[in-house]
Amino acid sequence: MTLCLDVGNTQIFGGVFSNEKLVTTFRKTSKTGSSSDEIALFLRSVLRENDIDPESIKQIAICSVVPDVVHSLRNACLKYFELSPFLLQPGIKTGLKIKYRNPVEVGADRIGNAIAATHLYPGKNLIVVDFGTANTFCAISSEKDYLGGIITAGLRISMEALELKTARLPTVEIVAPESIIGRTTVENIQSGLYYGTLSMIEGLVEKMSREAFKNEKPLVIGTGGFARLFEKSKIFDVILPNLILIGLNEALKMNK
């Protein structure tokens, strides 16, 4: 079995593959300062709670946008699983041609998403929209050229900014309102968060398609924690919440 771990700014998103099938997923707050013992005890416990023997894990793959967590996570793998983890980082095989001016700048999570997308949909122009602490948009050509993309503030960051920087606006539940015109302060904020993000996605995807693919319609993939929120809007051709885990598993196989 293979344990895949995506360390984001807010959460660690993990999953286990058995014979290429994703058999379970889990999440944990990715706070810095966690010791290797704390991380390992969580991992072993969550595996057992999902009826997976920790001793059955034979490979571990990690991607991280939080460098401070990597050291503890690597030591947890070495001490408690007796495995040296594979780290998705610059210099590994990806199957992609990175067109960034400085390829080292591309986040590991974005590369992982691109690996998975090109594996699942070969020969297609792709736009991947990942809803995390930040929203990321990535354009990948049918020839596996990673063309670049866009980064915007995520939904939760936007909500927290309103709360912190205003005197009377409250924290709200992030939902998809039925009406764009809210009739309470809470509904106003919810509408702004949802429909503002929706309009942004529609506009940016259209402009990216025009610039990158000469108006040839790409396959648009949604992923990340809030992707399902926009399911009814039909802006995505497919929503794959586990895209990064698939990408990590594929990267590990490429670099054996």
Image (cartoon, rainbow, N blue to C red):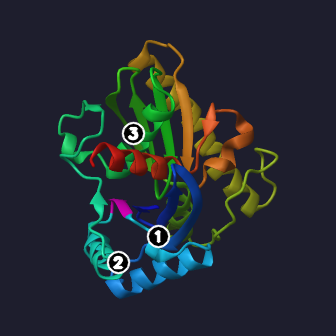
Residue 207, given in percent of the width and then of the height, sits at: 47, 24
Work out whether 110 lies above or below 173.
above
Quarter-wise, where is residue 66 in the image?
A: bottom left
Quarter-wise, where is residue 110 in the image?
A: top left
Label 3 to label 2: alpha-carbon separation: 27 Å
Label 3 to label 1: alpha-carbon separation: 26 Å
Work out whether 125 lies above or below 251.
above
Q: Are marks 2 and 1 in contact (CB under 8 Å)?
A: no
Identity of the residue drawn at 34% across and 50% down: 252
Residue 118, given in percent of the width and then of the height, sits at: 43, 32
- Secondary structure category for the residue under label 2: loop
Badge 2 crowding class, 10 Å Cα cut-off, few under 14, some 14 to 19, many 20 or more, is some
Badge 3 crowding class, 10 Å Cα cut-off, few under 14, some 14 to 19, many 20 or more, is many
Work out whether 205 lies above or below 130.
above
Q: Nearer the viewer, mark 2 or mark 1?
A: 1
Answer with left or right where residue 106 lies relative to residue 9.
Answer: left
Which residue, given by chain and number where applicable, does mark 1 sit on? 56
Residue type at mark 3? Ile
Residue 251, given in percent of the width and then of the height, sits at: 35, 46
Q: Earlier in the sequence, mark 2 or mark 1?
A: 2
- Residues shaded magenta: 59-65
Residue 224: in magenta span = no
| Residue 130: mark | none
Q: Earlier in the sequence, mark 3 or mark 1?
A: 1
Q: Earlier in the sequence, mark 3 or mark 2?
A: 2
Q: Nearer the viewer, residue 136 or 82?
A: 82
Which residue, given by chain and number where applicable, does mark 2 sit on? 32
Which residue, given by chain and number where applicable, does mark 3 sit on? 115
Identity of the residue drawn at 46% across and 70% down: 56
- Secondary structure category for the residue under label 3: helix
Residue type at mark 1? Ser
Identity of the residue drawn at 54% across and 17% down: 217
